[in-house]
Amino acid sequence: MDLGVRWKLHGDGRTPAPGAVVRPDERLSWPRTAGLGAQHVVAMFGASFVAPVLMGLDPNLAIMMSGVATVVFLLATRGRVPSYLGCSLSFVGVAAVIRAQGGSSATVTGAVFVVGAALFLVGLAVQRFGARIIHAAMPPIVTGAVVMLIGFNLAPVTATTYWPQDQWTALAVMVFTGLAVVCLRGFWSRVAIFLGLVFGYVLSWALDRIFGRIHSVDASGKVTDHWRLDLSGVGRADWIGLPSFHGPSFEWSAILVALPVVIALVAENAGHVKAVGEMTGDSLDDRLGTAIAADGVGSMLSTAVGGPPNTTYSENIGVMAATRVYSTAAYWAAACFALLFGLCPKFGAVVAAIPGGVLGGITVILYGMIGLLGAQIWLNAGVDLRNPLNLVPAAAGIVIGVGNVTMEFTDTFSLSGIALGTLVVIIGYHGLRSLAPPHLKEPREPLLDEGTSSYDSGSGPEPGQRAKS
């Protein structure tokens, strides 16, 4: 049985040819693959530590179980879908609601366990009936919008949490990382994100030594004098130790609050698989159901022992977009690192000490890359945004997702951000399509002002040849 754990050496294993990509079934040399794996771990660490902390769960357990979930995912998809399964931020609001109702950590993980089971069943349905049921519900206009709002929904995390902690360090890290991605060659350009983090770490240490404490908001959001790089937690942490385990508890009220998030998870998985397929040039329609089901299994395994739920991680799409290395060997390396790091509280303390300003500079680039992959899906599918049938639901859903708009249905149930934006795009598109006149469904003439579109210059497909969305 092919489990996708055999890789061909790409070229000489050192530097891919200009314009070439390292495909999922290829790898660079093992030292370089390990380095890329470490970069993937670093890329997901920020959110993977933030999510469990906000949910009141153990970050070290979260990192360990993200490695387990990633191994399950890679085995299930036979190594065709390069992906890291990290802690899902979609459940942070759900956890807050459950805890406000008096729920414990066990109640939170029990509710999320049920969501993982539901996601697993959705994956089985997609396997049975084919990816067409997802594509029917989420054509390119919908998928692109969902990928875009998932990426740009992360922007407030940068703007309100990371960047204000040290704006000048954030700016320096952003510039350094951008220059590294564009100007460095070979392997070094492919680990530019990691280099940016190291640069920011050292810069923050140096600024502390030269200028002393900074007066700004700290990680808790309070304006105070604080060190940019606080290593006090590193000295207190043990070198080896197990994370904190606990079993789930099931309560219907909590389950009903959490269950709608399955919509966001399906959208995240579909968008991720679509984005990876676009980047690698390999149709992954036949792997979509497996990917969704594997994500469900990974979340069930994690929450069964007290960890947070997992999802295909958009941060790592940004790393792949920057490095153009899609080797699943790098993700196996990342999973192994995560398993080891989960057993090392001291390493977790080192990563947790990464200054917020450094994360601000990095995430400005990463989160933007994620969102713009949605635009790439539109371009590759020939989606016509001059058609109001495409434009209106996508515009509304993206603003709702990016602005984190909330709809409160009852005192204990609401939808917001990614989940609400996804619903608006999907229901809005299909609802409008069912009511739209035929000339909007099959456009032959420009429906809105063309402006300076490619049709004016004679490039691109003719209006009658536009892809249907």
Image (cartoon, rainbow, N blue to C red):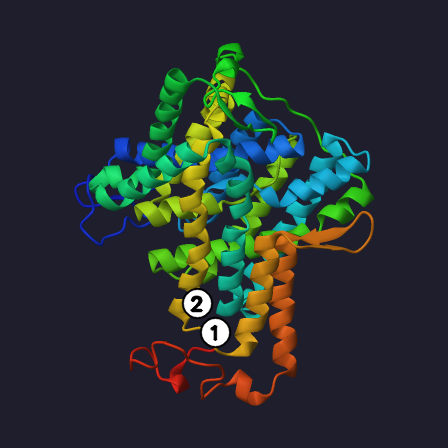
Q: Which residue is located at x 64 percent, y 35 percent?
A: 303
- State which quadrant residue 275 falls in: bottom left
Above or below, comparing residue 155 to residue 303 in the picture: below
Above or below, comparing residue 369 to residue 89 in the picture: below
Sequence-first disc among 2 and 1: 2
In contact (CB < 8 Å): disc 2 and disc 1: yes
Above or below, comparing residue 231 to residue 468 in the picture: above
- State which quadrant residue 459 falls in: bottom left
* Residue 273 place in picture, x, y as percent: 46, 55
Q: Residue 121, can we see it?
A: no
Pick the residue in front: 347 or 288.
Answer: 347
* Residue 63 place in picture, x, y as percent: 52, 30
Q: Residues within 10 Å of mark 1 (few under 14, many from 20)?
A: some
Q: Which residue is mark 2?
A: 378
Mark number displayed over residue 385: 1
SS category of the residue bearing label 2: helix
